[in-house]
Each structure stands twice: as structure tokens, then as C-alpha cells.
Image: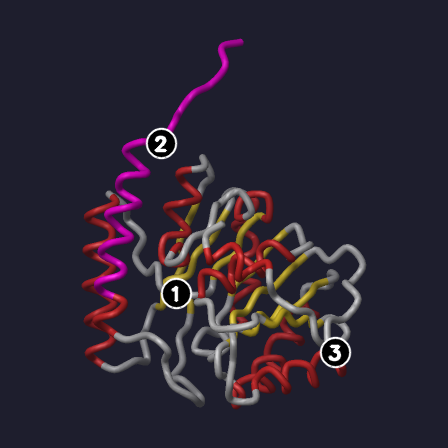
């Protein structure tokens, strides 16, 4: 079994609340050393989700944090019954964290968000109506509040990724996305798959659209991604996705 799948399944449940009865929405947030952002995150997310007027669950996936985030997540879960926490035994990466969240999600609609609050949870209600016509809606960070170098490297990586995969995804790195659960659970996750979710959904026959969303400066902590590490891994993964596209099966039974 590949390590990604083994790690996602080996998560231990600590401070794991009883599941909310039949949630409509499952919000999945990977967390790695984001202690200072956790309370503001929960405080920002809960009112937005409550405003939707339907049951929801907030799933925080602790990706082997070592800064006290793990303990704080358990404390927050003890105070908020709609908060569920999954703890990895060690750091496995963002794709594994998302895979675990997707596997445990019970809502018909799955929403992803990063823990750093650079994306605004208040934009979630703007994306949801589009699921009437599409299987997934992905955000485009309209005005980036990152360094000039990070903006350039992201734009360059998106351009290369789109060229190799023959895609038009403007901002695949934007963490704010919403999916129909049956669609995202069809995607087989692998290490690095989080950068290609729209394309992988399309390979399964699902539809995707893109909308501009807000972007804020990071409140606390630091980014966990190195520019060159992301570039080289992304290039290798893009070549793999291109191979998958060229070998994808497309068939329909004649009626």
C-alpha cells in the first residue's frame, strides 16, 4: 500500500466528537503548525456556516503538527460539537490531509480551506450556488497579498502546469474550493494531487468552474512551501497527469 494511503488511514482519533446528524456541508481544513491561526479560523468559519441554515461539520486534519496545534484542536473540539479532529501520527503532506478529510466527510457538499485564513470563509456562500450547474467550483485569488516573488512563482507554475496538462485553471493553488461529495470521493488521491484536483475531476467526467475570491495577508505563522521544492515536484507531477490524460478511458454503453 502506498505510504500516502497508509498514513491517511492511520490517523488516530483524539478529541473526536460524535458526528453531526446528517450534515449537509463538510468543511475540510488541513493543519500543520498553525496554532496562532486556529482560534481565529474557528471563530471566522462557524458564523459563516451557521448562516447557511443547514447542518455542517468542520473537519480539522492535524498533519503531524509539533507547535501545540494538536492540543489546541482538541480543546476547541471539546467546546464545539460540530468540530471534528483527525490527528496523523506524523507529517504526511497536504494531499494526505485532504484525502483523510474527504474520506471522513459526511456532507453532500465538501468545502476546502487552508488554516492560515488568507482565503476568506465569507466567500463560501458565493461559490455554493454554482453547484447547481457544476460538480466543483474553485477559487481564483483575485488580488494576491503575497510577496512579489511568490506571486511570480505561482503565476509561472500555473502557466507551466496548464501548458503541460492542456488546462485553463487560473489558480490551482487557491485552497478555497467546493465539491459535490460524490465527485471528489471519486478522485484517487496521491502525493501532490491537491495541485491538480480540477483536472483530476475532469478526468472522471465531472464539470468544474472558476470564480474570483478574496485573499488576505497571512495573520500568523509562515508558509510551509518552498518555491523550488514546489516547482520541481509540480513539474514532475504535471508530466504524470499529462500521461493520465493521454491514457484516460472514455466509453459509453450503446442503448
| Relative to 206, 45 lies left or right | right
Residue at the image point whose x is 77% and y is 74% from the top: 81
Q: CA distance from mark 3 to mark 2?
A: 43 Å
| Relative to 6, 196 lies left or right | left
Residue at the image point whose x is 57% and y is 70% from the top: 88
Q: Is residue 238 above or below residue 145?
A: above
- Name the N-terminal-most of marks 3 and 2: 3
Q: Quadrant of residue 44?
A: bottom right
- Residues 75 and 255: in front is 75
Q: State the image coordinates of residue 51 (x, y, percent, origin top left).
A: 68, 69
- Name the N-terminal-most of marks 1 and 3: 3
Q: Quadrant of residue 243?
A: top left
Magenta-colored span: 231-255
Disc 1 residue crowd, few under 14, some 14–19, many 20+, Cα 10 Å: some
Disc 3 residue crowd, few under 14, some 14–19, many 20+, Cα 10 Å: some
Q: Which residue is mark 1?
A: 174
Q: Which residue is mark 3?
A: 80
Amino acid at each position: 500500500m502506498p505510504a500516502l494511503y497508509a498514513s491517511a488511514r492511520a490517523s488516530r482519533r483524539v478529541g473526536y466528537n460524535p458526528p453531526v446528524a446528517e450534515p449537509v456541508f463538510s468543511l475540510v481544513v488541513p493543519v500543520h503548525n498553525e496554532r496562532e491561526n486556529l482560534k481565529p479560523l474557528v471563530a471566522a468559519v462557524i458564523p459563516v456556516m451557521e448562516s447557511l441554515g443547514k447542518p455542517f461539520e468542520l473537519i480539522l486534519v492535524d498533519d503531524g503538527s509539533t507547535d501545540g496545534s494538536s492540543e489546541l484542536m482538541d480543546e476547541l473540539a471539546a467546546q464545539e460539537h460540530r468540530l471534528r479532529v483527525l490527528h496523523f501520527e506524523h507529517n504526511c503532506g497536504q494531499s494526505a490531509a485532504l484525502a483523510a478529510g474527504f474520506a471522513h466527510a459526511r456532507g453532500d457538499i465538501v468545502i476546502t480551506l487552508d488554516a492560515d485564513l488568507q482565503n476568506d470563509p465569507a466567500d463560501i456562500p458565493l461559490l455554493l450556488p454554482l453547484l447547481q450547474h457544476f460538480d466543483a467550483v474553485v477559487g481564483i485569488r483575485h488580488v494576491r497579498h503575497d510577496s512579489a516573488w511568490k506571486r511570480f512563482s505561482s503565476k509561472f507554475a500555473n502557466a507551466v502546469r496548464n501548458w503541460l496538462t492542456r488546462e485553463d485553471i487560473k489558480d490551482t493553488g487557491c485552497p478555497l474550493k467546493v465539491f459535490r461529495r460524490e465527485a471528489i470521493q471519486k478522485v484517487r488521491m496521491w502525493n501532490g494531487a491537491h495541485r491538480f484536483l480540477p483536472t483530476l475531476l475532469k478526468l472522471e467526467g465531472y464539470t468544474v468552474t472558476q470564480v474570483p475570491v478574496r485573499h488576505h495577508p497571512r495573520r500568523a505563522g509562515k508558509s510551509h512551501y518552498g518555491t523550488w521544492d514546489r516547482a520541481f515536484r509540480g513539474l514532475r507531477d504535471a508530466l504524470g497527469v499529462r500521461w493520465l490524460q493521454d491514457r484516460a478511458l472514455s466509453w459509453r454503453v450503446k442503448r
